[in-house]
Image (cartoon, coloured by chain):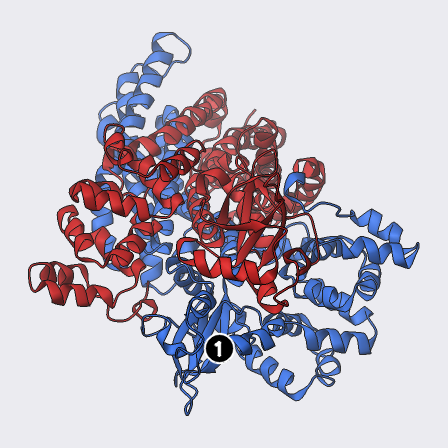
Chain colours: A blue, B red
Amino acid sequence: MPASLRSPHVPTPPELLYLLHGDPEELAEALASMRAADVAEALRDLPDDAAAKVMGALPFRMAVEVFDEPELEGHRCPIITRMGDAAAATLIEAMSSDQRADLFRELDERDRPRFLAPLAPATRESLELLLRFAPETAGGIMTTEFVSIPASWRVHQALEHIRAVARSKETVYAVYLLEPETNRLVQTVGLTDLLLAEGDAAVTSVRTRRKPLTVAADTSREDVARLISKYNLLAVPVVDEGGHVLGIVTVDDVIDAIVREQTEDVQRFGGLEALDEPYSEISFARMIRKRAGWLCALFLGEMLTATAMGHFEGEIAKAVVLSLFIPLIISSGGNSGSQATSLIIRALALREITLKDWWRIGLRELPAGLALGCILGVIGVIRIVVWQRFGWYDYGVHWPLVAATVGGALVGVVTFGSLAGSMLPFLLKRLGFDPASASAPFVATLVDVTGLIIYFSVAFAILRNTLLR
Amino acid sequence: MPASLRSPHVPTPPELLYLLHGDPEELAEALASMRAADVAEALRDLPDDAAAKVMGALPFRMAVEVFDEPELEGHRCPIITRMGDAAAATLIEAMSSDQRADLFRELDERDRPRFLAPLAPATRESLELLLRFAPETAGGIMTTEFVSIPASWRVHQALEHIRAVARSKETVYAVYLLEPETNRLVQTVGLTDLLLAEGDAAVTSVRTRRKPLTVAADTSREDVARLISKYNLLAVPVVDEGGHVLGIVTVDDVIDAIVREQTEDVQRFGGLEALDEPYSEISFARMIRKRAGWLCALFLGEMLTATAMGHFEGEIAKAVVLSLFIPLIISSGGNSGSQATSLIIRALALREITLKDWWRIGLRELPAGLALGCILGVIGVIRIVVWQRFGWYDYGVHWPLVAATVGGALVGVVTFGSLAGSMLPFLLKRLGFDPASASAPFVATLVDVTGLIIYFSVAFAILRNTLLR
C-alpha cells in the first residue's frame, strides 16, 4: 500500500520490536493510536513471541479487533498458543463468530479441545454451527452476530433494542424482522428506514414489503458476492430450509472473498493450482507441489507434439525449411486461443453468457479467428518475401510456395486456436469442471498438437509436387 | 445468476414486453414488486424504445433507482434520448451524482448541452466537478451526496440533521465532521457511534479521535478499493489538498471497481487489451481491434524464433531427430514462465511484495525453476527411453545422447522460464508499465526464443562429436 494510503503514525515492525523492550506505557500509547488493521499487519511481520507480547499489551477491545482482522489469518494460531491460557480464552470468547470459526479451522486438531473447553455454551454452539460449513460457502463466511427482532414490534422498541445490543453485533445497519411464533424471516429493514419512521409505527411498515433476499448456507461465496454487489446490500441473511436466519454475510467479508477468488483465478489461468496462501509466505516445498502438478500434466499432453512430429520426420528431412516456422506457427495458435479463453472464462464468471450460449459464441469466434488469422498470415508472408528479396535469408527456390504454406497454416491455426480456446471453458463446465481450469498453458498445449497437424497438412497440400515430392 | 439467487416475481423481458402492450396498471403493478437492480437487468435486454416506455411507467422514485444502477451502464443514453425531454430532465436531476456523471460521460458530445441546460445550478456544478476526474480514479467514482456537519454540534443536532437529509444521501452511516470556520475534515464518525452516545454529548467525543482515513481525487480506484477493504469501511472521503471533502466513495462502488479490475486483469493476462465492455455486447470490429494489437505484437516477437531457427538449420539438417522435441521443450519454458508470472503479478497487485523484493524473488525462483526443470527433465528422458526400448519410435543409434540433450535442455529451459517469468513483471513495473501487461503469451514468446538457443546449445555440447559432427 502506498505510504499516502496508510493511516498516519503507524510504527514499523522494527519500531514495535524496539518499543516492546522499552517502556510498556510508551508501547501502549503507540499502539492505541493505531488502527486494528495496521496492528494486524505489523503483527504479521513480527516474530510470533513478540506478536503474542504485543497482543498482551493492547487494550482488550483493541486486541479483539486486531484478532478479528482477516489480515491476521494464518498467524492467529502461533500467536494464541503463545499467549496465557486465560488471556487466550477471554480473547476467543470476545471475537466475532466468523473469525472465531476461522481460527478454529486453522488450529491444530490437538490444540482445539484446550481452547474449546473454556468457551461459554452459547459461544461453543455457534462455533460448532459455523464449523459445519465449508469455508468457501455462505455458511463458512457468515457471522452469527446480527440484529433480529419480532416483526410485531414498534419502531421505538426496535431502536432501543439496537442501542442496547449494537456493541456486540457485526452490523446494525440491517435489521431482520422475524415472525413472532416461528422465528421465520419475514422482512429486512435498514437502520435508516427505522430512523426516518415515526416511533410508534409498526416495524413492518417502514419499507415496502417484499420477500427478502436470502442465500442458503451452501451458496458459494462467489454467488453471495454477486448478490450483494448486484443489489448493493450491506449484508445478506443466510437462512435454513425453514426460513430461519442462521447468520449474515457482510459486505466486508464479501470483498475479502472477491479478492481471494481473483487471486485464485489469476493463478489458475497462469497454469498452476491456486496457492491458497501468500506467495511470500508459502513454503518452498508446498509451492513446488502446487506448480509441479499442472506443469507435469501439461508436459504429458505436450508430449503428443513429439509423437506428431515423429510422423512428420520424413517431411522435415525433405524440407528442413519447414521446421524454421514451427515455433512461430504453433505459438500463434496458442496466443489466439489464450485470448479467446480469457474472454470466455470471464464472461462465464460474470454470467454474461451461460452454457447454452456455446454455439452463438462459436459462430462469433469462427469469423474472429479467421480475421485474426488473415492478419497474421499476411504479416507472415510479408516477412518471408522481405527476407528473401533483401537476401537476409534464403528459403530456397520454392520460397513463394513456402510463404504460401506459412500464410495458409497461420489462418488455419489461429482460427482453430480461437475456436478451441473459446469452446474449452464450455466443455469443462459441461463436464462438471470449473471453466476457469482452462488456463492459458492448457489451451496452448491443446492447440500445439493440432497446430502441427494443420501446418504439415497445409504444407503437404501446397508442396507435395515440389519440396515434399 | 442462478435462479435461486434472483429476487422472486421477476418478469422476464418477454413478459415485460407483453405487459407493455397490455393494461398499464398491470404493468405498473408487476414493476412495483421488482427490485431496481432486476428492472435494470430486464431493461438491458429490451429494445431501447420499449425500455424507455417501461421507464415512463415506473413510479418516479423507482425510475431514479433503476437509472442509478451501474448495471444499466451503456444503456442509459439510448433510453434517455428516447424519453420526453421534461421526464428526462427531472430524472437526471434526481439521479445520484456519481451515476449522473457516468451518464454524461457516455452521452454523445452533441447531446450533452440539451440535457445539461435544464439542470439546477448546484447540480450542474457538482456534475462539472465530477466530470473533471478520470473515471478510474477516486474522483471519477465518488458521489457528492454525503452527510457532513460542523464539528461543534451536539449528538442530538446531528441525529436530527441526518433524519432530515437521509433521503437524498447515498449513505448516512458515515458522518463527516468539519471544522466550522474552514470546512476542513477533522473526523469521521459512524451512525452507530451517534446512536449509542448521549444526546447532548459533543459529536467529536463519540469516538476516539484519530486523523481520518482519506484519499485524494486522483488516487486510483484500485487503491481506494484496497483501503476500504483493509479497514472494513463503508465509505471513504475524497479530500482536496486543503483537506476539504469533495465527495465520498462507497463500498458498493468499490465492489464494482474490483470486479471491473478483475475482468481487465484476466483479459490482459490472456494477452489482449481489456475490452472495457461485456463480451456479449462489444461489436465485432472493436473486439478484433482489441485482440489484433497484442496478437500482432506477439507475432512480431515470435518471428525471432524463425531467425533463431535459421541459425540452427544446419544442425536440424544433420539431426532431424532434434526437431521432434522443439515444441515440447519451448512450451515447457512458456508454461513454467506463465506460472511464475501469474504468481508475481498477483503478489505485486496485493502488495505482498514490492519492486525492491525482485532479487529475493529471483533467489527463490532460481531453485524453484531448477526443481521443476529436473522433474520435467526426468519425465522427458523416461519417455525417450521407453519409446526406444519398446520399439515405438527409433531415435537413432545415439538415442541415449538425444535423451540426455532433451533432459538437459528441459532443466535449462524451465529454469530460465521461471526466472524470466518472475522477473518480467518487475522489469515492466520498473520501466513504468503496468506489471499486469506481462501476459502468459508475452512470457511464452519471450521464453520461446531463448528456449531454442538453450536447446541447441545443449545439443551442440552433447552431440558435437556424434550427430552434429
Instruction: Name which residue type carries label 1.
Output: His
| Residue situated in front as seen by the camera: B3 or B13 | B13
Badge 1: residue crowd in 10 Å (few <14, some 14–19, many ≥20): some
* Percent of width and height locating residue A209: 32, 74
A405 sits to left or right of B349:
left
| Residue situated in front as seen by the camera: A224 or B69 | B69
Q: Secondary structure at mark 1?
A: helix
* Residue drawn at 23 percent across, 41 percent down: A366
B98 sits to left or right of B402:
left
B95 sits to left or right of A180:
left
Look at the image and tell me whether residue B428 can be seen.
Answer: yes
Q: Which residue is mark 1?
A: A156
* Percent of width and height locating residue A232: 41, 59
Most distant residue in the top direction: A390
Task: Please report, as a chain letter, where disc 1 is located.
Answer: A
Q: To which quarter of the image does residue B9 belong?
A: bottom left
* Residue drawn at 62 percent across, 86 percent down: A122
Instruction: Tell me the quarter of the image containing the C terminus of chain A.
Output: top left
Look at the image and tell me whether residue A409 can be seen.
Answer: no
